[in-house]
Image (cartoon, grey):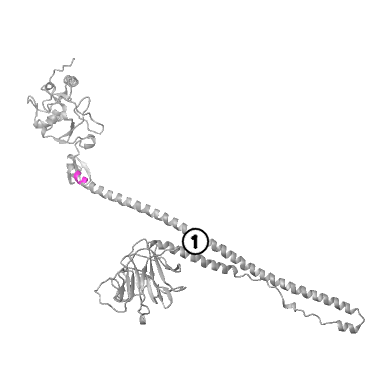
């Protein structure tokens, strides 16, 4: 049959949706409708009437496909140019009404809970014009309709069960989920969206924290590499110097052994000469005696016979080989001393890299103490000042703390103790007792050394007596909080004094200075001074 482009669209329009037939079905009274339209129309009716002639049917009619009209509609669609609209893209929802080239759906219609139809802009037009269709629920285009339908009841999943946290249809609420609280899916979506926003924020924060952790680890590795390079460089310097000392002490050791050997050889050589001289004298004497014994002039014989030359008693004379016992040990002892000096100097140089700038806190200073304006020096004033009460202040011991505290990492500072006859310094934890007498030991939060009457000790359960080689002018204190290490150094001599290891730190640590007693005529009046680090090779 030839197509006729003059045919009107009204001839092939459904009287319900007013659009070109889509799968046209014929009622027993002979009128044609879209299958979806007539089915949906009768779903909402109690009596089954024809929408055109109002013929009443006792039972729901069984509509049949109108093959002739279907073919006519197909020819009409091919002959009439539909208003151009963009074709559907792979990620978009296609129109369910379009035949041939499907166009992009702009809305989906939810008719009741059983049917979902998506429409392009052209096929959506009746829903915006016909009163009956205006009541239909239009939503954003939906794809994968099979995933949006209840598998058990073949209805739209438009509710959410809060008990089992699943999407359900209306029929589910009176069967499997009868006693469960349910809410509209849109309402639950809004809740979930808000939760996802919070989760997204938390995830972003966690990501940021992990990025910072990565940066921290990278910074630690970089710092570790720098420390390793510096340590290797210092080690090369120390071992180079040590090899020089080894060569020096080896030369001196060899020289000592050779000198002793040469002394023995010279002693033996002198004895050889003396013995050879005596042998020569005795040989001459023997010849002379033989000659005189052969003459008959007795008088001449007695006159010529002289007293024998004096000889040495060689029975007690011997050459003893020198003893080298202890020579090597004494050399190694000297080498060990030099090696320790080199190691101490290298260690001090390393810890000085962790110098921190600290100042004394006047709120902690005992009333008899006087602090400099810059907070770097303190001395015993001898007179108790009247000061406001402060829980941070020492009221029994003449001590003071720094403003700054440390709860991690490594730090180092130096204190000048020149001309002091008695002092105590180190680090203490924040919670130490400041108002009464307490034993300053690690158990009570003190890691300190005490100088008193030319005696230097580390305060522990029992005093640890420390060597005091010469006048101590400046003390260095190094703390590795994480490793639990506190070390003390004689800065001027560049010698390690003592290290407390295995310490347990759980609070902030402060630099602690104690000026001890104010002796008669101000003998202990010299200040304690926090001095800047002066690194020397």
- Look at the image and tell me in which quarter the N terminus lies: top left
**Depicted 181 relative to depicted 316: above or below:** above
Helix, strand or loop for the magenta stretch, by majority: helix
**Depicted 485 relative to depicted 30: above or below:** below
Q: What element carries label 1?
A: helix
Q: Does the magenta stretch include residue 191?
A: yes
Residue 112 appears in view: no
State the residue in front, 176 or 242: 242
Give percent across and percent down for residue 504. 37, 65
State the residue in front, 63 or 197: 197
Give percent across and percent down for residue 247. 57, 62
Circle 1 sits on which residue?
A: 238
| Residue at 35 percent of width and 54 percent of height | 216
State the residue in front, 396 or 258: 258
- What range of the chain is rendered magenta? 189-193
Give percent across and percent down for residue 266. 69, 71
Mark 1 neighbour class, 10 Å CA radius: few under 14, some 14 to 19, many 20 or more:
some
State the residue in front, 68 or 231: 231
Q: In which quarter of the image is residue 276?
A: bottom right
**Depicted 222 relative to depicted 70: above or below:** below
Q: Is residue 341 magenta?
A: no
Give percent across and percent down for residue 93. 22, 32
**Depicted 385 relative to depicted 242: above or below:** below
Q: In which quarter of the image is residue 516?
A: bottom left
């Amino acid at each position: 049959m030839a197509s006729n482009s003059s045919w009107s669209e009204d001839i092939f329009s459904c009287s319900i949706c007013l659009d070109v037939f889509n799968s046209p079905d014929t009622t027993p009274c002979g009128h044609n409708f879209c299958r979806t339209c007539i089915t949906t129309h009768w779903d909402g009716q109690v009596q089954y009437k024809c929408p055109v002639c109002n013929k009443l049917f006792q039972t729901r009619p069984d509509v049949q496909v109108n093959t002739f009209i279907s073919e006519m509609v197909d020819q009409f669609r091919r002959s009439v140019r539909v208003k151009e609209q963009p074709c559907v893209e792979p990620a978009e929802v296609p129109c369910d009404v379009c035949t041939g080239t499907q166009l992009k759906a702009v809305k989906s219609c939810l008719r009741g809970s059983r049917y979902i139809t998506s429409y392009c802009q052209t096929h959506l037009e009746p829903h915006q014009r016909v009163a009956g269709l205006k009541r239909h629920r239009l939503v954003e285009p939906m794809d994968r309709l099979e995933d949006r339908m209840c598998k058990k009841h073949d209805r739209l999943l438009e509710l959410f069960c809060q008990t089992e946290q699943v999407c359900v249809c209306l029929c589910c609420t009176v069967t499997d989920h009868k006693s469960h609280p349910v809410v509209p899916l849109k309402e639950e979506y809004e809740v979930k969206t808000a939760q996802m926003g919070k989760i997204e924020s938390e995830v972003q924060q966690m990501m940021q924290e992990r990025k910072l952790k990565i940066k921290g680890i990278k910074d630690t590795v970089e710092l570790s590499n720098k420390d390793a390079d510096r340590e290797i460089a210092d080690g090369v310097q120390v071992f180079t110097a040590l090899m020089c000392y080894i060569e020096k002490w080896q030369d001196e050791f060899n020289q000592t052994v050779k000198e002793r050997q040469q002394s023995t050889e010279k002693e033996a050589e002198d004895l050889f000469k003396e013995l050879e001289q005596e042998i020569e004298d005795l040989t001459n004497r023997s010849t002379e005696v033989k000659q005189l014994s052969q003459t008959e002039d007795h008088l001449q014989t007695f006159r010529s016979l002289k007293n024998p030359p004096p000889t040495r008693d060689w029975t007690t004379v011997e050459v003893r080989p020198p003893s080298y016992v202890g020579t090597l040990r004494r050399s190694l002892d000297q080498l060990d001393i030099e090696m320790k000096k080199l190691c101490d100097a290298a260690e001090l140089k390393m810890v000085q890299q962790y110098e921190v700038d600290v100042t004394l806190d006047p709120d902690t200073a005992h009333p008899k103490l006087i602090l400099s304006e810059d907070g770097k020096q303190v001395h015993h004033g001898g007179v108790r000042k009247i000061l406001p009460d402060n829980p941070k202040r020492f009221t029994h011991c003449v001590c003071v703390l720094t403003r700054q505290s440390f709860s991690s990492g490594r730090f180092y500072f130096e204190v000048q103790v020149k001309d002091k006859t008695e002092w105590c310094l180190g680090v203490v934890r924040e919670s130490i007792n400041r108002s009464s007498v307490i034993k300053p030991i690690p158990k009570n939060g003190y890691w300190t050394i005490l100088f008193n009457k030319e005696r230097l000790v580390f305060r522990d359960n029992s005093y640890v007596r420390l060597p005091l080689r010469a006048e101590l002018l400046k003390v260095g204190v190094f703390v590795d909080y994480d490793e639990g290490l506190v070390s003390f150094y004689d800065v001027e001599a560049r010698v390690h004094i003592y290290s407390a290891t295995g310490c347990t730190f759980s609070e902030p640590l402060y630099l602690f200075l104690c000026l001890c007693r104010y002796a008669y005529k101000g003998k202990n009046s010299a200040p304690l001074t926090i001095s800047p680090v002066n690194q020397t090779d």
